[in-house]
Image: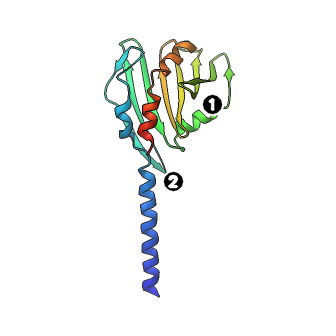
Amino acid sequence: MRIRNIFIFVVALCVMLSASVAVAAEYDYKDMIPVLPDSIGGMAKSGDPDGGNVQTSGETWAAVEQRYSDGEGRVRLMVVAGAVAPQVQKFRQLSLMEVETGEAIIKSTKISGREAVFQIRKDRAGGTLGIAVQNDVVAAIETNQEVSEKELISLGEEIPVEEIADCVTK
């Protein structure tokens, strides 16, 4: 009886570990690096991309970031994959609202046929645009420059969403 219980415990442990490894491998930030564009808005890459894979309570997500600069302005592109990623959660929340205050404008739009949400700050220069690449994958661009809605959307149109979608699809 004791050997049988040990055998069942070992089998259950192996199943749990193999399931954990399979989930952890769902997204990998290194897979996203090759599809990051060489430039955005006329700004070249500034440094190497940075990223990581995160596992929280059995859920995994991955993120990669690339900065771009032309000396004066800066743009940051981030690709985040995973349902529990904070950026994906924030995108989902913002996509349900349209807001205009004295400090910011938040609106939904479409870019490359995909849902997108942008925020333009009124109280200081800059804006953010997120694009739903897939259900649990968001590409976001952030700039520190004075930017209009049209300019921010134009930057977003330079994000290679199809290539990103292909690289995160397993």
- Mark toward the viewer: 1 or 2: 1
Given the image, on which type of amino acid does mark 2 rest?
Answer: Ser
Residue 21 picture location, percent across and down: 41, 56
Residue 30 lies in what quarter of the image? top left
Number of marks present in the image shown: 2
Q: Nearer the viewer, residue 15 or 106?
A: 15
Q: Residue at x 42, y 15 (%)?
A: 41
- Crowding at dot 2, Cα within 10 Å, few <14 / some 14-19 / many 20+, comes out as few
Tell whether 153 sits left or right of 94: left
Tell whether 104 sits left or right of 14: right
Residue 64 picture location, percent across and down: 41, 35
Q: Residue at x 59, y 15 (%)?
A: 123
Q: CA distance from mark 1 to mark 2?
A: 25 Å
Tell whether 142 sits left or right of 31: right
Question: Please, what secondary structure does the residue beneath circle 1 have?
Answer: helix
Given the image, on which type of amino acid does mark 1 rest?
Answer: Leu
Residue 83 picture location, percent across and down: 54, 44
Q: Residue at x 42, y 62 (%)?
A: 17
Q: Are marks 1 and 2 in contact (CB under 8 Å)?
A: no
Q: Earlier in the sequence, mark 1 or mark 2?
A: 2
User: Which residue in the protein does label 1 denote?
Assistant: 94
Name the disc covering residue 57, or none: 2
- Residue farthest to the left, as pictured: 47
- Crowding at dot 1, Cα within 10 Å, few <14 / some 14-19 / many 20+, comes out as some
Residue 28 lies in what quarter of the image? top left
Q: Residue at x 43, y 79 (%)?
A: 6
Q: Nearer the viewer, residue 54 or 79?
A: 79
In the displayed structure, 135 sits above or below 156; it is: below
Question: Please, what secondary structure does the residue beneath circle 2 have?
Answer: loop
In the displayed structure, 18 sits above or below 122; it is: below
